[in-house]
Image (cartoon, grey):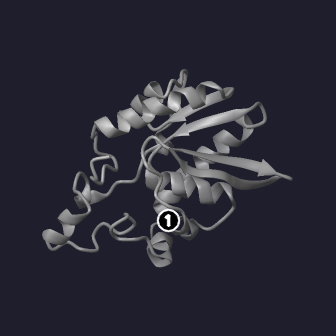
Amino acid sequence: MSGQHAGRTGIPLADAGAAAANSLAPRLARRHLVAVLSSPLSRAPRTAELAGLTGVRADSDLMEWDYGGCESLTAAQPRRRGRAGTCAGTASFPATPAILASSSSRWPRADAALDRIRPLLNDGDVAVVAHGHLARVLTVRRLGLDVSAGRLLGHPHPGTLSFLATEDEQPLIAAWNVP
């Protein structure tokens, strides 16, 4: 939780993120998981490990998107460097429907990951350890919504849980950003 746009950069899990992941272990130990999928970026599998999840399978479609010139920068740094607006889609430069619509190359990965996850759900719960913006996209796509709806969800913080469920065959958010 360094405040950096980590994206595809190999920024390690911060101490606060590690502590938050550790605190999830007792709650996750009570769940029967049929699969655990994770971004291959080191901070995601490390989060899974600290949260007590085993049998983690890396899935490159769960990687966060590339923030380009904003990789590794904090939210304030692009503004100070005269690059305001170059980190569109981040918390400091909120994603608008137009930006999301023009960024379609980011979303097929989420749909592909969901296509692999859906059959697993027939056998039980699946844990996905991914990154904030991608988690929002996965969620709204699972709900059958346009990706622009992701701007309505709070940014998932490291070491929090969000639960998606199904009720009467309709996907829904059962919990969001729970410490």
Q: Position of residue 152 (x, y in %)?
A: 55, 68
Residue for point 27% across, 40% down? 11
The residue carrying mark 1 is 104
Residue for point 59% across, 30% down? 28
Q: Quadrant of residue 76?
A: bottom left
Q: Nearer the viewer, residue 150 or 177?
A: 177
For this view, does 141 lie left or right of residue 107? right
Image: 76 above or below 20: below
Residue for point 47% across, 32% down? 23
Label 1: few (<14), some (14–19) or many (≥20) C-alpha neighbours in 10 Å: few
Q: Is residue 111 visible?
A: yes
Q: Position of residue 94 (x, y in %)?
A: 40, 71
Name of the residue lying farthest toward the top: 54
Residue for point 47% across, 78% down? 98
Q: Position of residue 179 (x, y in %)?
A: 50, 44
Q: Nearer the viewer, residue 131 or 1?
A: 1
